[in-house]
Amino acid sequence: MNAPDRFELFLLGDGETKVSMEQDTRQPNAAIFTFNKEDHTLGNLLRATLLHNEHVVFSAYKVPHPLFPKFELRVQTDEETTPKEALLAACQSLIGDLQMLSQKLTREWELNKIARDTS
Amino acid sequence: MDDYDTIYGSDRGPQITIKEADSRHAQIVLSNCDLAFANALRRIMLAEIPTIAIDIVEIQTNTSVIPDEFLCHRLGMVPLDSTNIDDKLIYTRDCFCDQYCERCSVTLSLHARCTGEDNVTVYARDLVIAEGAQLGSPVINDPEGQGTVICKLRKGQELRLKCIAKKGIAKEHAKWAPTAAVGFEYDPWNKLRHIDYWYEEDAKEEWPKSKYADWEEPPIEGEPFNYDAVPSRFYLDIESAGSLPPDEILQQGIKYLQEKLAAVIETFSNKNETGDGFGDGVRSPGQDYSMGGMGGGGAGYETPYQGGRTPFGGGGFGGATEYGGRLMGGHKCVAAVAMG
């Protein structure tokens, strides 16, 4: 009926960007990132990874409404870095971690396969 | 920028151990990572790995007792072989064709008729895949080699239809899910007390031990509770629906999670034409991301809503986008002629 198309959950609409940043005017080094067409998968992952950064003072996310596929991530850092830098560093470190995980998985799976074939 | 170690040894970063595996399922242990990481991997494997499934059904004849819509739904659920789908098939929405073509779809046809006195059962193996298709054959795992049951026919009943299988992800429809289930567990001894067991008299007696309990040290009696402890070992049990083997599901999960993160980086490097050090442009997630190009980054960026990338053809308002006349959302039965 009037239900939105399911692909609107993951395809950006016309003129929409994946992430937008808004500086928090009340505090220095704080910003709210709005992620479009993303959910807890990325939200919680980034939140947790940002908190591992010692320069990040605050990091939390919320999904403003469950019917809209977006979330807001608020990041506050100390003077050493900026929220944007911290976010990009988090993304990059995660990509690196995942790359290593992928290599380890390939190796483990091969070993497991050999073990299975011989037994 | 030394917050994250850029030099990784093999014992750095998340670790993976395979406990048990075969062609349909895998039990793995993820360690040295946090809960959010393991959960992100679980969520992405459930919802965002592309596979192929029947999306459009053109029914010529259906004189069975099952209505067209019902039959279409059953056909959509049939798992189809999707190994290495990213090299073989593109999304219909990214294709230049009008409705569907060989680059973005696979055609399967089904013709079955009952002539004898006994009822005939139509199985997934009866789906005939178009010649030259690189993937999309029905997954058959049972010892009889028949696949899933599609429908049953009585004497004189006939089925004649054409199915168009397309690439998609489970976020759009569950028929595209590569996994039947992903088991997820941590802290089998409940040392972190994330669970509060209900009990009649004694929780230890009444609750069965986790199957992963032997993999971790049992708690020591009288041990003080550690308030700072966080889970770091996660037990995942990936159960494939048949379209992809479990190792490929995991690898694809990693890949699409990387792509998600790369999209975030990409957004920032795209809109920084004012030049503040993110000029590295787009890099595919397969590459190693160094910490190189980070720098600068003053305050007050002009935020987006200009020049946003759209994955589906430029321009046009209203129904002019490719989605305008597309058939999406569920299994469509296009035509039902020659009934009765």
Image: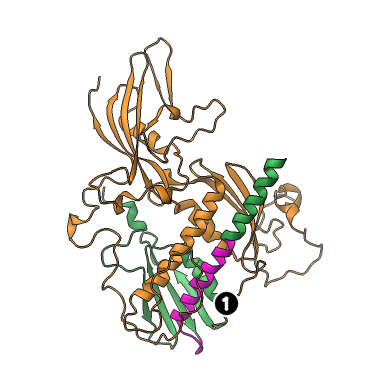
**Percent x, y of residue B201:** 74, 51
Please name the residue that numbered disc 1 is placed on. B4
Q: Is B131 within the magenta?
A: no
Q: Quadrant of the C terminus of chain B?
A: top left
Label 1 Cα crowd, 10 Å radius (few <14 / some 14-19 / many 20+) = some
Question: What kind of colouring is applied to the model shown?
Answer: by chain
Residue nearest the viewer, comparing B32 with B126: B126
Among the chains pictured, the one given orange colouring is: B
Label 1 marks a residue whose chain is B
Q: Is residue B199 visible?
A: yes
Q: Magenta segment, which residues?
A: A78-101
Residue nearest the viewer, comparing B190 with B162: B162
Q: Quadrant of the N terminus of chain B?
A: bottom right
**Percent x, y of residue B92:** 31, 49
**Percent x, y of residue B246:** 56, 47
Residue under the image location 34 percent in, 34 percent down? B72
Residue nearest the viewer, comparing B26 with B279: B279
